[in-house]
Image (cartoon, rainbow, N blue to C red):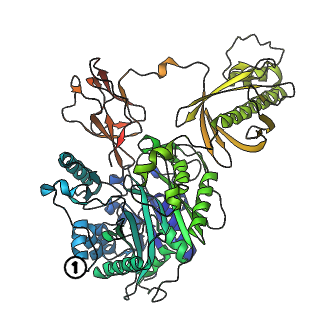
Amino acid sequence: MTITTLLVANRGEIACRIFRTCRDLGITTVAVYSDADADALHVREADLAVRLPGAAPADTYLRGDLVVAAARAAGADAVHPGYGFLSENAAFAAAVQDAGLVWVGPPVKAIELMASKTRAKELMAGAGVPLLAPVDPATAGEADLPLLLKAASGGGGRGMRVVRELDALPGELLAAAAEAASAFGDGEVFAEPYVERGRHVEVQVMADAHGTVWALGTRDCSLQRRHQKVIEEAPAPGLDEALRTRLHEAAVAAARAVDYRGAGTVEFLVSADGRPYFLEMNTRLQVEHPVTEAVFGLDLVALQLRAAEGEPLPSPEPPQPSGHAVEARLYAEDPARGWQPQTGALLTLEVPEGPGLRLDTGYTGGDTIGVHYDPMIAKVIAHAPTRTEAVRLLARALERARVHGPVTNRDLLVRSLRHPDFAAARPDTGFYDRHLADLTAPGAGRDPATAALAATLAEAVRGAEAVRGAEAAGGAGAVRGADAVRGTEAGRGVSAHRPAPARFGAWRNVPSQPQRKRYRSEPDGTEHEVAYRTPRTGIPQPYETPGTRVLTATPDRVTLEVDGVTRHFAITAHGDRVHVDTTDASYTFTALPRFTDPATHTAPGSLLAPMPGTVVRLADGLTTGVTVEAGQPLIWLEAMKMEHRILAPASGTLTALHAAPGHQVEVGALLAVVQEDPAATPVPVPVPEETA
């Protein structure tokens, strides 16, 4: 059957990516969208779109019946599931086919066999695929530690825990099972040995209905946070030819064991001594598929569509690979604060274009990153003849990108790519456990003070231009109006017949006196005070900043000579936020008022929501008046597909509780108050900890 109209049962980046191939093939595209995604990029790019009423995934993208009804309403003849949501749901695949639609995915039976990791391991053992021996949690002893608990269904790090102490095992089992049940509707959890400093290596397979199975090389996905991938590359570096051959053969055997068709990924854990162990088979397209496409010169989505139409693969053997590709996932999150997801307006998203670079995203500047879905903004991919060149190209592209809005992991990605361990092709799953503190520390080579100076000079020029524009437009009265807009108080002695002097940062522009501006650097909170003067030439000059000379200054661009080196600064202001982009770093500042606002202070011991989300549970017996201990988990908050614990900041009494299961809370909402017991040992306030 020839596919003419395709519905993508997904959202965001993967929906946009599939639409791109459909446009190249002349296939009409259909999007589905929740109310939260009404203005999303994937909706704007589709030829047709069907609303799924509601915002939560459980009410929209996870409602297979609504998706099938949407496909029929739009006249689609095929459905592509993307990744996540219903992509590995056998019942949904069957429902699509029962409705007379083409399912762009593997056979229902293959999905069923691989859906449970425990059953999949049993099947793979029969196919001769190497496995880790399972561990029965009920009989686990010290010799079995550390253990890895995993959800039998689903993926993405949900329901996964590392257990290093036997006393923690019962509680972690309960937590993993609860999270798995919430995420996948299946609370089954199993345990296996946790391989320290192992590598996550996977093989992309592509199969048709005519007996051909391709093994499209390896990918290394070892750099992970919360058991979710951050940086991926192809081919996996540092593997000898014998190990590559073994991985390819095992992946093909896994695919043939379930009569697989379409795109799939067989994932392995490779120990430090080079022994591979089967982890799971993902019966869908992977997030990191672009690195394989780059190396093999293929369009995997086009091959998926071809296989779904019953066509054979182009040849018995895959094409020869060429070069190296690396992909980085740009997330709206703060790695220095427990990887907390961030939300809000994505004001600017600009990634350099050029040979070897690719951007896959579901956002453009002006879109909003909401609380309901994964915080990934984009994937940036670089392809070059060698690994060194690809890594360098990707790091530089990320460094030069302009990303304004929520805090992102962009700086972490750049530092990770340039870290000696990664550069030496020694990635492993413990990379961030060892290096996160160094990777998120204030960076060498960064100069926020000079960036703040550039922001101040640009604002001074902008203010002066506003005054001149007001004078030209309406004389003194217009000047007073412009002055009022800048927050100047009424009754400051400004004559109705004389233009008011320009003011910057709430200070009168008297040439003999320096003007001062205060900024808070985001997200670390460091404050910077900048002093400058505006001589009669009208060009603001730094004050008490030796070795710095202003070459040019406009409202959106400042060029400084700093210790003999010319540096350029691009300035973008959004309200009280100022973004400063240079050729090798980016800075975000919040302009501060001259005096602090007492209303911004909260009572000691207040527990505030670190991000918008839903309260999913409270500690047992938590109620006003109970005694809590410092560091004790009190409230569990779910945001952007992950679960976070809110910990007691000190030992004392819970004097207020405003959270309850099911409550939707905004960032900064007061959840509870703990009144510290003066007799208790003081404990530093912990950052809300990621539990998934």
Q: Can residue 342 be seen?
A: no
- The image position of residue 105, as x and y in percent, is 38, 74
Task: Check the image and report above or below for 320 versus 385.
Answer: below
- The image position of residue 391, as x and y in percent, is 57, 62
The image quarter containing residue 602 is top left
Q: Can residue 590 be seen?
A: yes
Task: Check the image and report above or below for 96 versus 162.
Answer: below
- The image position of residue 423, as x and y in percent, is 53, 60
| Extreme residue toward the right, this view | 537
| Extreme residue toward the front, this view | 273
Report the residue at 36% width, 48% height from top: 642
Query: Three-letter amino acid code at disc 1?
Result: Gly
Asked if residue 103 lies left or right of residue 46, the reply is left
Q: Which residue is mark 1?
A: 126
SS for dot 1: helix
Pick the residue in front: 515 or 134.
134
The image quarter containing residue 213 is bottom left
Q: Residues within 10 Å of mark 1 (few under 14, many from 20)?
A: few
Report the residue at 81% width, 20% height from top: 511
The image quarter containing residue 159 is bottom left
- The image position of residue 90, as x and y in percent, is 28, 69
Asked if residue 68 lies left or right of residue 191, the reply is right
Report the residue at 42% width, 50% height from top: 434
**In which quadrant of the rendered image does the N terminus lie?**
bottom left
Pick the residue in front: 115 or 520.
520
Report the residue at 67% width, 25% height from top: 517
Asked if residue 589 lies left or right of residue 201, the reply is right
